[in-house]
Amino acid sequence: MSAEPVRVGALGMGWWSNVLADAIERTPELEIVGCYTRSEDKRKAFAKKYSCRASSSYEELLADDSIQGIINTTPNGVHLETVRQAAEAGKHIFLDKPIANTVADGKGITQACTDGGVTLSVGYQRRRENQFRWVKEEIDAGRFGKLVQADANISRDRLGQIDLSSWRYQATGMPGGVILQIGIHYTDVLEMLMGPVKRVSAMSARLVLPGDNPDIANLVMEHENGAISNLTASYASASEYYLTNVYGKEATAYYDLFTGLRHLKRGEAEPEAIPYEKNDTIVEELEEFAACIRGEATPEVDGQRATESLAVIRAGVKSVEQCRVVDVAEILASPDE
């Protein structure tokens, strides 16, 4: 570990900015020294809570030479402009997923950081969970054999808990609804484990929550290796639940929130429980960001990877809109996506 923490500024003072700031306080690798959001009350409260300076403008925050990186939790629709400004100021960027609402913006963000010579690290903490790391290691070692199928579910109860004035729950701010807001975590996990997605067929609906965005969605994905995976994401469920099952010809991994991780080899009758420690994934991704700034690492999820991840979701949204199977390559090639 470095003796001096990497100094960062926080941009955006929503609830997730506090989650990231709390994680920064759990590691000696970073220090928040400045913050900005348009609301004076919010930035003053954040500055008091995390003992940092509140800037009166984003330009003032970027002009602070002591700040090496920006922790950006702004709405998806302003990611391109806020990242471009930071990159032009020579600040490295940690950007919460998704990289943007459109693939075109994702590409623009990636290019801006390349042009500015700064690191772009995109926050996908779910892929870092130790149960998925264990499965990934087994797959990479060849012990799953040919991958054939995967099932995943990420469900939460949001009835009575959403603020319809928030961009997170509006179709313009979060196009695709639940599948973009939380489903993208598990499409990312599935791609990490099963390989890149080639094409997508999807359905979505608004069944429980008010507003104009889907609260449940299902994606059936064909991976480039021929395997098929299925993901359901929901804000309309009775409780929080996570599931990921990965099926290979030689072994299967079963994970869910309540029973943990189990592993079944071909020919065996009962699965084996796999012990693992719950890890602090948000601290890990932020420590990686600090290491990138020091030149000691590269981002696990960079701009290109995050844009490809977004393209899977955009293919799902287009599949719903046009009632057809959509190739991810079509989305990546389109200037309108």
Image (tube, grey):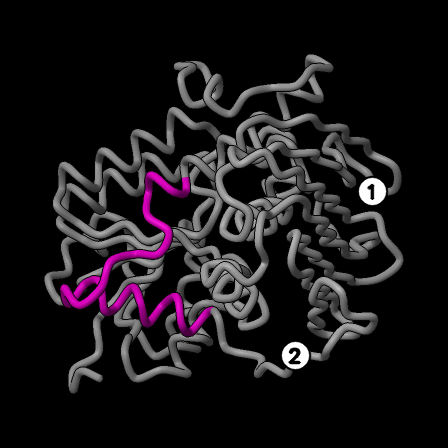
Q: What residue is shown at x 41% (from left), y 42% (from top)? A: 306
Q: Nearer the viewer, mark 1 or mark 2?
A: 2
Q: Which residue is mark 1?
A: 209
Residue 229 placed where, x, y %?
Answer: 67, 41
The kind of residue on which mark 1 rests is Leu
- Any mark on residue 67, and which? none
Name the main secondary structure of what is drawn in magenta.
Answer: helix
Residue 67 placed where, x, y %?
Answer: 18, 64
Quarter of the rendering containing residue 243: bottom right
Q: In the figure, is residue 87 to the left or right of 56? A: left
Q: Is disc 2 placed on a helix, strand or loop? A: strand
Q: Which residue is mark 2?
A: 274
Q: In the figure, is residue 324 to the left or right of 136? A: right
Q: Residues within 10 Å of mark 1 (few under 14, many from 20)?
A: many
Residue 270 placed where, x, y %?
Answer: 81, 73
Quick check: can you spot residue 202? yes
Q: Is disc 1 placed on a helix, strand or loop? A: loop
Residue range (magenta): 282-306
- CA gap between label 1 and label 2 equals 37 Å
The kind of residue on which mark 2 rests is Ile
Front residue of this view, candidates 25 and 225: 225
**Residue 290, relative to residue 146: is it above or below?**
below
Residue 41 placed where, x, y %?
Answer: 46, 61
Nearer-N-terminus badge (1/2): 1
User: What is the residue that sits farthest to the front in this orientation?
Assistant: 267
Quick check: can you spot residue 16? no
